[in-house]
Image (cartoon, coloured by chain):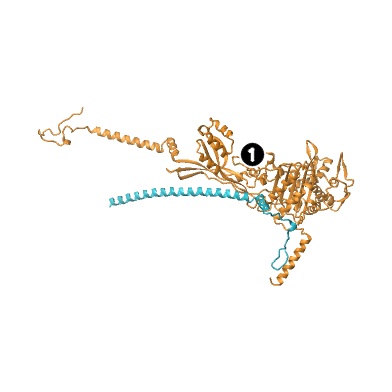
Chain colours: A cyan, B orange
Amino acid sequence: MSRALIFLLGILIVLSAFGIVTAQYRTRSLFVEVERAQQRTAALEAEGSRLRVEQARNAQPAAVEAAARRLGLKPIDAKETVYLPAVTERGGKQ
Amino acid sequence: MLGVRAARGGMGRGERLAFHANPLLAVKVPAWRSRLLLLLLFCAFIALAGRAIWLQGGGNTSFLQRQGEARFARTLDVPATRGRMTDRNGVVLAASLPAKAIWASPEDVDATDAELARLARLLELPLTELKRKLADEDRRFVYLARQVDTAVADRIADLKINGIGQHRAFRRQYPEGATVAHVVGFTGIDDKGQEGVELALDSELAATQGRRHVIKDNLHRYVEDDWLQMPVDGNDVALSLDNRVQYLAFTAVREAVQANQARAGAAIVLDVKSGEVLALANWPSFDPNDHSRRGSDAARNRAITDTFEPGSTLKPFSIAAALEAGTVTPQQTFQTAPGSIRIQDRVIRDSHAHGLLTVEQIVAKSSNVGTVKIAMQLPAQKLWDVYAGAGFGQPVQIGFPGATAGRLRPARTWREVEQATISYGYGISVSLMQLARGYLVFARDGDTVPLSLTRLTEAPASVQVLSPATAHSVRHMLEMAASEEGTAPQARIAGYRVAGKTGTARKVQDGHYVNEYVASFAGFAPASNPRIVVAVMIDEPGAGRYYAADVAAPVFARIATGSLRTLQVAPDALPQDREQVLAQTDRARSSARREGL
């Protein structure tokens, strides 16, 4: 009886030891994965930042104006602007 | 030594014995010897165990721990990014991008000349400069470049030169370049703010680097970590600027300075309701991305740090003081003929004699004589109160480095002649920012709000400086000044009513007035319900024209036109034929409706 119990406990100890090793291993591989994901996040954030800067650079009013002039456009002049009144549902002027 | 005896004495001769039973091998050992051996072995094990315990947790473990750590543990700096700066609509004005710092350990560098030449080209350094940096073999560490593009850094790494290393750094990018350079400012090599908002809000923008302790496995992957300090990214800052308005102001100032061959120029656009600065432009300017031009004179934010005598742009404040004190009414007349007046030993003149003028016309036609006559009826303190209330003599509190207070001396020190000259803007000095803030009082209903360079979520509390009635009267006078009968019809714009005042002031050099001028214009639009204040200053126009009406007023008109359109402000002065167009559209609309369309 007691011999069987010792044997059983021995097996449990071995199993739990394996369990610990596996858990430790899994922890570390997950950690490696998290680490890799975090690096990717950082890289993507840096890339996003770079793109926003590039967007700002390309959307600079100076750049837009230069492009518009190449297309033969010119700034709006109030003299050529027709202002329309805002009309409410019932047709009254606002 | 050992006694040997036969184990079994009675054994017969010729009888074969098993080897192990050979009596020659039968040794009689005293019992104490085996016990001693056992004891010695036991002691040795105890000593080993003791040593193991000692090494693991005993007194002196630092050496082994150091050795162990050196093999699998590292303490890493974790970079954190400085906050971004955007305009009020989220357009990026400054952002930190990853870069690399390139360093060298001169004693370890053993590159050929060809390799060094390639390195120098990548670093954009002259070869001689690079060689000079590497020549000092006593130094273990020298930076070759601090903020190198990651792509370039990769190519440098590909050269595989011994003794050349890299580490992570950041490079601050300013996509708008020279347009907002003076407001945004720039950071130094260590990513700390040095000028402008980068300096003013450094504590907000600055990031705190993190540190962590990591353990590596045999594949050099990090498998465990322990944070010593979490990295904290800097906060993003939204400025009050609108980059479209900023661009309008910047190009208008630049072109005006160039066309008038002036020394410098500046313009400011304020939001009347909130006191936010929508644009602050200076020319000459500089590119903050180019480190070499930063220290130059062009980097000065003249609109905030430089003062000038405002001249006639100050007159409305003197008139407002008189209206507020009740000594004059807008329609009251003053005789300004013969166009000059003597105060103590000084003769004050108008550009030409105007004759009999109402108070309104004195402002509209910018009569020095009329203004002096009105101002001299007042106690000096009353004038001072209005000037100080409008913010003259105190630095503009926008947290900007180097904001000047200008000069407004206490009223009790004014002599009679000084009271006279100050009333039309001489003997007092202001920055363009102060002038813009002052005009806020007329654009609002006699109250004022603190200016802000950052975007506000709610309007700040205002302080009453003048009564609303006085502010409205002055607003009307300023509208006259910017009309056909005033001094600056050039300030008018299509579709909107504008109000504003010119100022052409002589400059003081070495204590004397010289034939150099500062032309300024301060005003607001639309006059019926002001939305923006625009102040313009052109320093030393040199192309023959120097009157503010010719030099500064057109800049005002250009900035105001563009800004009002950009901000989608409804026009308050539609031309007559446009009204007809509207009427036609109305008729077309109603007839379309009748026909059931």
Pick out the residue farthest to the top.
B1
* Viewer-closest of B576 and B126: B126
- Is residue B266 in view from this perspective? yes
- The residue lying at 64 percent from left, 47 percent from top is B176
Q: Which residue is mark 1?
A: B292
Q: Residue furthest bottom?
A: B595
With respect to residue B114, does B534 lie above or below?
below
Q: Along the horizontal axis of the image, is A15 left or right of B140?
A: left
Q: What is the chain letter for disc 1?
A: B
Relative depth, front residue between B581 and A69:
A69
Q: Position of residue B104 (x, y in %)?
A: 53, 35
Taking depth in this image into account, of B180 and B195 the one nearest to the observer is B180
Q: Residue at the spot x=25%, y=34% of the render?
A: B34
In percent of the image, x 32 and y 49: which residue is there? A10
Mark 1 Cα-neighbour bin, 10 Å: few <14, some 14–19, many ≥20: few
* Quadrant assignment for the C terminus of chain A: bottom right
The reply to whether residue B150 is in sight is no
